[in-house]
Amino acid sequence: MANYRVNIWRQDQTEKQGRFEQYRVEDISEDMSFLEMLDVLNEKLISDDLVPVAFDHDCREGICGACGLVINGIPHGKECGTTTCQLYMRHFTADTEITIEPFRAQAFPLIKDLMVDRSSLDRVLQSGGYVSVHTGAAADANNVLIAKHKADDAFTAATCIGCGACVAVCRNASGMLFVAAKTSQLALLPQGQPERLERSLSMVKQMQDEGFGNCSNHYECEAACPKNIPASYIAQLNRDFLNASMTSKEYESQTHCKSLEE
């Protein structure tokens, strides 16, 4: 059993001033997950008639993407390919200090303490992350032959859980890795071809409207991704976006009007 000093960001709401508060958590088993450690802290705060720490969580199995904390300056912590809920206290030295912050980005407005609103990612996905083609039942789908390397690449892109760690770690708060994964998982399959170029245009435009920054080419998004999604998908998105912008009359018209206004 170990003890820790945790510095946690406390903030009642976006408009109010935030601050770090330090707490001591005791008798923490090395087999506890990081979120279970926070549960222990909240139980103590509640027993002392204090306000518990608000943080996001749901499945606690590394699937849903709900958990998201910046731990000692790194989204989801220092362990590669690991979500916050899969991070265990054995990864931390006993009697050390741990600093916990929320994901910080313009597109992720803070709700309370460690909770942020990541619905901007949902709106980006809703703008084009779907196919309108009728794929039929399972038997029909199995009749569509797809090369294994294409299927594997599409599956890798589809493992994105939309947690937003790539945004939180990027100095420009870019959502490019998220958008690239969500476009590539469809662009690599035959069902996603009819709307491939339109999809890249609409999702990139929505990403910009939500306030995400541009790619900084530092590859921190790839390093912080709990699903180890490679940044090479961003190159695929850029190619599709370039092709779409040169062939879309609507995009050319919007760009021309914007240049005239400036």
Image (cartoon, rainbow, N blue to C red):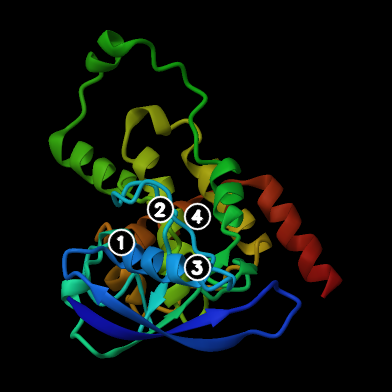
Q: In 3D space, how far apart are the residues under numbered discs 1 and 2 (Cα atoms)?
A: 8 Å
Q: In 3D space, how far apart are the residues under numbered discs 4 and 1 (Cα atoms)?
A: 30 Å
Task: Please tell me how many numbered marks the rendered image carries.
Answer: 4
Q: Nearer the viewer, residue 140 or 22?
A: 22
Q: Which of marks 2 and 4 is nearer the N terminus?
A: 2
Q: Is residue 69 left or right of residue 13?
A: left
Q: Is residue 162 visible to the viewer in this orientation of the structure?
A: yes
Residue 201 at x, y percent in the picture = 57, 50
The answer to whether marks 2 and 4 mark residues whose Cβ atoms lie closer than 8 Å is no
Where is mark 2, residue-wise?
65
Q: How crowded is mark 4: few (under 14 residues within 10 Å), some or many (20 or more)?
A: many
* Mark 1 residue type: Thr
Q: Which of marks 4 and 1 is nearer the N terminus?
A: 1
Q: Residue at x 55, y 54 (%)?
A: 121
Residue 249's place in the image compared with 130, above or below, is below
Where is mark 4, residue-wise?
241
Residue 136 at x, y percent in the picture = 38, 11
Q: Residues within 10 Å of mark 3 (few under 14, many from 20)?
A: few
Q: How crowded is mark 1: few (under 14 residues within 10 Å), some or many (20 or more)?
A: many
| Label placed on residue 47 | 3
Q: In 3D space, how far apart are the residues under numbered discs 2 and 3 (Cα atoms)?
A: 30 Å
* Mark 3 residue type: Ser
Where is mark 1, residue-wise?
83
Foreground tag (3 vs 1) = 3
Q: Earlier in the sequence, mark 4 or mark 3?
A: 3
Foreground tag (4 vs 3) = 3
